[in-house]
Image: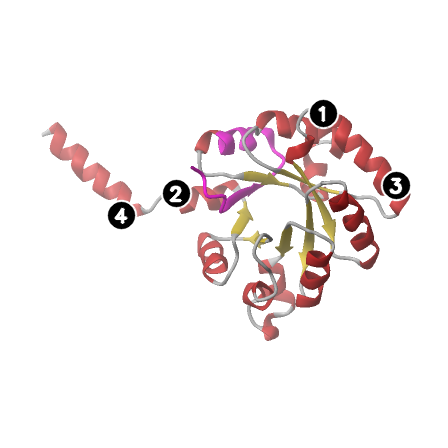
C-alpha cells in the first residue's frame, strides 16, 4: 500500500499518467503557475487531472482575490471535478482573509491545504480552522530566510496528529529526504526528482553484473 510520502508537483498530463503508473506517487499538487503552463483555464484542466490520476488527492490552488470570486471559482472547480470532488484538496495561500474561507470550507466537509507557509503562527491559524495540510516552500525559504535555519523543523513542532506537513519547493532528492528526516510527512516535487529517488547507480551496476553472468 502506498504510504503517501511522494507527490508529483505538475499539471502535465503525460507526467501525471507516468506518476499514476509508477505506484510510488500518492497524489498530484498544482499551483497557478503550473496550471497556466498547461491551460488557460485552471478549473477546466483540473477535470482532466482527476480523470488521469484516480487513486489519490489532487490539489488545486484558488486564484481568486475576494470571497465572492473565490466562491465562484469553487463552483467551477466542483463542476470540472464532478464525481471526484471528494479527492480535490483546495489550496489556499496563508493570508488573513483566507482563514475565514478555510473555516467555512472545512465546516462543509471540504479538505483544505494552506500553502506558502513560512511561520509557525500560520501553522497554528491553519490548524485552528481545520486545515488538513500545511505546505511550506523549502528551497524558497532557504534562499529568503536562510539565517533562520531550516524551515521544516521550525514548523513541524506545531503540526498536530491528523494534519500533514507536505514540503514543497523541493529541488533534489537530498532535499526531499532531508525534509522528511526533519519532520515533513511528505514531499511534493518534480518527476525527475521522484525518478532520482527510485534508483541509484550502484543498483544499476549490480543488475548489469548479474546480467553479464547470466549471458556467460
Q: Nearer the viewer, mark 1 or mark 2?
A: 1
Closest to the observer, 2 or 69: 2
- Say which mark, if any, is on residue 82: 1
Is residue 40 among the parts visible in the rendering? no
Mark toward the start of the polypeptide (3 vs 1) = 3
State the residue position of label 4.
202
Mark toward the start of the polypeptide (2 vs 3) = 3
- Say which mark, if any, is on residue 69: 3
Badge 1 local density, few (<14 within 10 Å), some, or many (20+)? Answer: few
Closest to the observer, 213 or 169: 169
Label 1, label 2: how many angstroms apart (C-alpha)? 34 Å
For the residues bearing labels 2 and 3, Cβ distance under 8 angstroms: no
Asked if residue 10 is among those painted magenta in the image, a careful observer would answer: yes
- Say which mark, if any, is on residue 198: 2
- Say which mark, if any, is on residue 191: none
Mark 4 secondary-structure assignment: helix
Q: Residue furthest right?
A: 68
- State which region is magenta: 1-20
Label 3, label 1: how many angstroms apart (C-alpha)? 20 Å
Indicate the quadrant where residue 149 lies.
bottom right
Label 2, label 3: how many angstroms apart (C-alpha)? 41 Å
Q: Position of residue 215 (x, y in %)?
A: 13, 28
Mark 1 secondary-structure assignment: loop
Report the side of 100 relative to 199 (left or right): right
Mark 3 secondary-structure assignment: helix
Q: Nearer the viewer, mark 2 or mark 3?
A: 3
Q: Position of residue 95 (x, y in %)?
A: 78, 57
| Colour scheme of the picture | secondary structure
Asked if residue 32 is among those painted magenta in the image, a careful observer would answer: no
Mark toward the start of the polypeptide (1 vs 4) = 1
For the residues bearing labels 1 and 4, Cβ distance under 8 angstroms: no
Is residue 156 among the parts visible in the rendering? yes
Amino acid at each position: 500500500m502506498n504510504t503517501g510520502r511522494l507527490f508529483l508537483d505538475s499539471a502535465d498530463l503525460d507526467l501525471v499518467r507516468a506518476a499514476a503508473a509508477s505506484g510510488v506517487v500518492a497524489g498530484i499538487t498544482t499551483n497557478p503557475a503550473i496550471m497556466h503552463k498547461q491551460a488557460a483555464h485552471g478549473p477546466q484542466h483540473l477535470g482532466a487531472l482527476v480523470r488521469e490520476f484516480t487513486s489519490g488527492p489532487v490539489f488545486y490552488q484558488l486564484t481568486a482575490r475576494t470571497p465572492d470570486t473565490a466562491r465562484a471559482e469553487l463552483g467551477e472547480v466542483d463542476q470540472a471535478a464532478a464525481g471526484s470532488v471528494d479527492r480535490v484538496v483546495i489550496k489556499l495561500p496563508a493570508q488573513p482573509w483566507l482563514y475565514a474561507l478555510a473555516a467555512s470550507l472545512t465546516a462543509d466537509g471540504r479538505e483544505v491545504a494552506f500553502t506558502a507557509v513560512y511561520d509557525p503562527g500560520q501553522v497554528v491559524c491553519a490548524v485552528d480552522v481545520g486545515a488538513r495540510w500545511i505546505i511550506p516552500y523549502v528551497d524558497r525559504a532557504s534562499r529568503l530566510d536562510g539565517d533562520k535555519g531550516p524551515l521544516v523543523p521550525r514548523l513541524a513542532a506545531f503540526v498536530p496528529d491528523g494534519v500533514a506537513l507536505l514540503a514543497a519547493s523541493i529541488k533534489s532528492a537530498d532535499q526531499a529526504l532531508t525534509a522528511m528526516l526533519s519532520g515533513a510527512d511528505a514531499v511534493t516535487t518534480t518527476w525527475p526528482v521522484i525518478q532520482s529517488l527510485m534508483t541509484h547507480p550502484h543498483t544499476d551496476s549490480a543488475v548489469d553484473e548479474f546480467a553479464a553472468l547470466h549471458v556467460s
